[in-house]
Amino acid sequence: LAKTTQPISMDSYEGQEVNITCSHNNIATNDYITWYQQFPSQGPRFIIQGYKTKVTNEVASLFIPADRKSSTLSLPRVSLSDTAVYYCLVGEMDSSYKLIFGSGTRLLVRP
Amino acid sequence: DTAVSQTPKYLVTQMGNDKSIKCEQNLGHDTMYWYKQDSKKFLKIMFSYNNKELIINETVPNRFSPKSPDKAHLNLHINSLELGDSAVYFCASSQVGAGGNTEAFFGQGTRLTVV
């Protein structure tokens, strides 16, 4: 399974756009890229998933370059409630029975 | 309606005791998981089941025994609890093989404290 590397922590202010980049140099052809969000004392929550190019939903956007060796989660106009840990996962979602979580990026949004 | 529910939410027990954590999902998923999140916040997979069959066992001590009576339930029984077992345990479910957007749903977690 591809290993992921992401920043340990990031700081931002309310209203700003936050971009969290994840490196996954050994991504395989069948691997998808998925991001989860975890608030304190809660289980992780799915945010977005993509395979290539750009994916957008009501919460975030996911940018994936052509070589797919990295991906960027973009959170538009963050609020205090976006303070959480964000995990990047890479795996063959269609047949994988093992979601591997890395260390995640701890995002702190300040007023 | 809670998609993945775990009970209890908190569990405090003494070393050497045996305890169980229950998990139920009402999403109709075939695959269920148990994860352990330690004090350093690392989420590690312990087990995964598909249609009541054990698929993944990530070198978890034999004291941990998952049981899946049906595909909507995956319970975790722990024998002879040790201090190092203190952690938050998360149950999750997903529909592997559904194609496209496959996401996992997690329960609220069970905070186990062994004293």
Image (cartoon, helix red, strand yellow):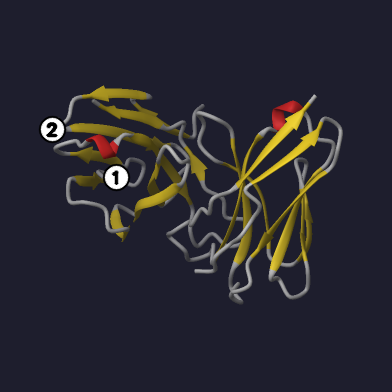
Q: Cβ–Cβ below 8 Å for labels 1 and 2?
A: no
**Horizontal and vertical percent position of residue A103:** 54, 50
Residue B23, label in figure = none
Mark 1 and mark 2: Cα distance apart in space: 29 Å
Subunit ID for the residue under disc 2:
B
Tell which of A16 and B10 is nearer to you.
Answer: A16
Point out the frontmost of discs 1 and 2.
Answer: 2
**Residue A107, image quadrant:** top right
Q: Amino acid at mark 2?
A: Gly
Q: Amino acid at mark 1?
A: Asp
For residue B16, the mark is 2
Instruction: Name the quadrant containing residue B36.
Output: top left
- Read off the residue under disc 1: B70
Q: Earlier in the sequence, mark 1 or mark 2?
A: 2
A5 over B2 or under it: above or below: below
> Could you tell me which quadrant the C terminus of chain B lies in?
top left
Q: In the rendered image of this protein, does residue A65 appear above or below residue B112?
A: below
Q: Are labels 1 and 2 on one chain? A: yes
Residue at coordinates 20% horizontally, 31% vertically from top-left? B19
Above/below status of B50 relative to A52: above
Residue B31 as seen in the image, left or right of residue B101 = left
Depth check: give the residue in front, B62 or B98.
B62
Identify the secondary structure beneath mark 2.
loop
